[in-house]
Image (cartoon, rainbow, N blue to C red):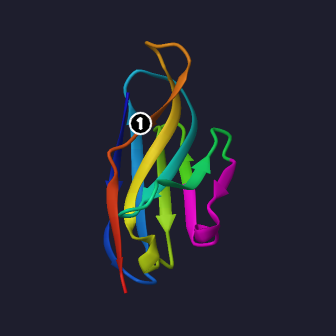
Amino acid sequence: VQLVESGGGLVQARGSLRVSCAASGSIFRINDMAWHRQAPGKQRDLVAIITNGGDTNYADSVKGRFTISRDNDKNTVTLEMNSLKPEDTAVYYCSALMVARDRPGSSRYWGQGTQVTVSS
C-alpha cells in the first residue's frame, strides 16, 4: 500500500494551488484521508481531514481558504488551496487510515511529501 502525492510548487501570495494524492496497492478499505504540513523547524500539523462519508474538518488557519475532497472510486484526495499566504509554505503530506488486505486492523499510511512555497 502506498500514497503518492502530486502537485505543489511555487506560487505568489494570494494565488492558488492544488495538491493531490492517490492511494494504491492491496487496499481493503480507506477510512479517513488527510493533509498535513510541516514547515522547517516546526512540527507536522494537520491541515484538513475528510472521512469516507465526506465529513470534513480544517485547521483554523486554513478555514475558508482550503478545500479538501476525495474520490472514493479512485482512492484519491485533493487539497485546493486559495488565497495562499507565505506562512502556508511547507512540505505537504497526505495520509490515509487504511485497512490493507494482507494485514489485520487499520494503519495510517503516509505519502512522501510535496513542497509548497508561497512567495510574498
Q: Residue furthest bottom?
A: 120
Residue 81 visible, this orientation: yes
The quadrant of the rendering that contains the N terminus is top left
Q: Which residues are magenta?
A: 55-68
Total tally of numbered discs in the picture: 1
Tell me the quadrant of the picture where the C terminus can be found: bottom left
| Residue 11 lies within the magenta run | no
Observer-nearest of 50 and 105: 105
Residue at 56% x, 53% y: name it.
69
Report the side of 113 relative to 59 (left or right). left
Q: Work out whether residue 27 or residue 41 is closer to the camera in this orientation and state it.
A: 41
Element class at badge 1: strand
The answer to whether residue 77 is above or below residue 59 is above
Q: Can residue 8 be seen?
A: no
- Circle 1 packing at 10 Å, graded few (<14), some (14-19), many (20+), is many
Where is residue 51? Give x, y as percent. 64, 42
Image height of 41 relative to 21, above or below = below
How far across and how far down the image is residue 117, in percent? 33, 71
Where does label 1 land, which residue? 23
**Residue 80 locus on image (x, y percent):** 49, 64
Name which residue lies at 45% across and 75% down: 87
Residue at 42% of width from left, 79% of height from top? 86
Front-most of residues 54 and 41: 41
At which x and y percent is residue 9?
30, 67
- Residue at 47% across, 42% down: 95
Q: Amino acid at mark 1?
A: Ala
